[in-house]
Amino acid sequence: MRIVTPPIKSQGIKTKLLPWIQALMPSVPGRWIEPFLGTGVVAFNSGFRRAVLGDTNPHIIRFYQAVKEREITPLIVREYLQREGEILRKAGNKGYEHFTYVKDRFNREHDPLDFLFLSRAGFNGMMRFNRKGEWNIPFCQKPERFSKSYITKIVNQVHATACLIQPEWQFLNEPFENIISLATERDIIYCDPPYIGRYVDYYSGWTEDDEHRLFELLAATKARFILSTWHHNDYRKNEMLGKYWDRFNIVTRDHFYHSGGKIENRRSIVEALVFNFPAYMQEHNHGIEPTREQLVLCEEREKYITQQLTSADPVSLRH
């Protein structure tokens, strides 16, 4: 199955878990509602023609809104990264001086292209902001970061994202409470909030009070929902599951992530999906026999995404 990877990078991105999440998605006649958009990888591969996509990080929303409105196109991205990448390559202190220049410029002007640059040139694919809302991730220390092949990879990701964003997709810089309140019984809500105690890669932070408010909203919604969270790791359990979420259906899956580039930095965690509708799925590691309905849904989703990627007018995306 083809997965479209978005151009914005962040730790915690759900690319490797996406087939597991997709297999659980029910068929609904309404919209895809996602109050924690992040990189957008789940939304862009959801296959929905109508969506409400929210995040408290204004830079994420501004970037994808600009892609939707063709203010950012593959050609614009290529020219920008070629120019800035060449300056980075020649800059003093092994590129650090120009990275700092772009970071300071972004913190003043909030240009979406500078946001993309920092997302791809920051250390270890992380996204973090300080209390003033300023970019707070250091340079990856690779002055040759924006090679020709790497720029082409990013440009292709922008192109694919532009193909999948639909006219009836809304991008809203709103708190999760406002986004969830828009859902009806015809919609599905997908939530991937920050993980308490594990995940600091978020614009506004996350507390147990936030988790409690999220629980109250999802417990009361008439929509179907899927919540991505974690179950346990080698050291401790997610106490929020027992406190709030175990009254719903829960399935888990082993997952590995890297906290650095070396193999010894590979860590294991058991991820969890919480949902409020029936599903034919074993409780751990997704050893399922898909129903005919689920197989049809997955086939239709993949066919739709392929059509969107191949039917877009290259000229309209270029200018």
Image (tube, rainbow, N blue to C red):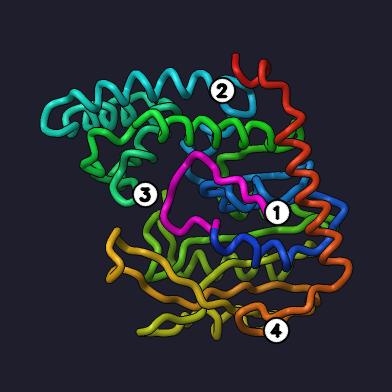
- The residue under the point 24% across, 39% down is 142
Q: Residues within 10 Å of mark 4 (few under 14, many from 20)?
A: few
- Location of mark 1 (residue): 181
Mark 2 → mark 1, Cα distance in angstroms:
32 Å
Mark 4 → mark 3, Cα distance in angstroms:
33 Å
Residue 11 sits inside the magenta stretch: yes
Residue 57, image x, y percentages: 47, 43
Mark 3 → mark 2, Cα distance in angstroms:
22 Å
Give the structural element (helix, strand or loop) at label 3: helix
- The residue under the point 35% across, 49% down is 128
First in sequence, mark 3 or 1: give its number: 3
Give the structural element (helix, strand or loop) at label 2: loop
- Location of mark 3 (residue): 125
250 or 7: nearer the viewer: 7
Mark 1 → mark 4, Cα distance in angstroms:
31 Å
Residue 95 vertical position relative to residue 123 in the rendered view, above or below? above
Majority secondary structure of the magenta segment? loop
What's the mark number on residue 73? 2
Residue 296 vertical position relative to residue 131 in the rendered view, above or below? below
Is 160 displayed left or right of 276 in the figure?
Answer: left
- The residue under the point 70% across, 35% down is 309
Q: Which residues are magenta?
A: 1-15
Mark 3 → mark 1, Cα distance in angstroms:
32 Å
Residue 297 sits inside the magenta stretch: no
Place residue 111 in its image quadrant: top left
2 or 75: nearer the viewer: 2
First in sequence, mark 4 or 2: give its number: 2
Give the amino acid at mark 1: Ser
Q: Residues within 10 Å of mark 3 (few under 14, many from 20)?
A: some
- Location of mark 4 (residue): 282
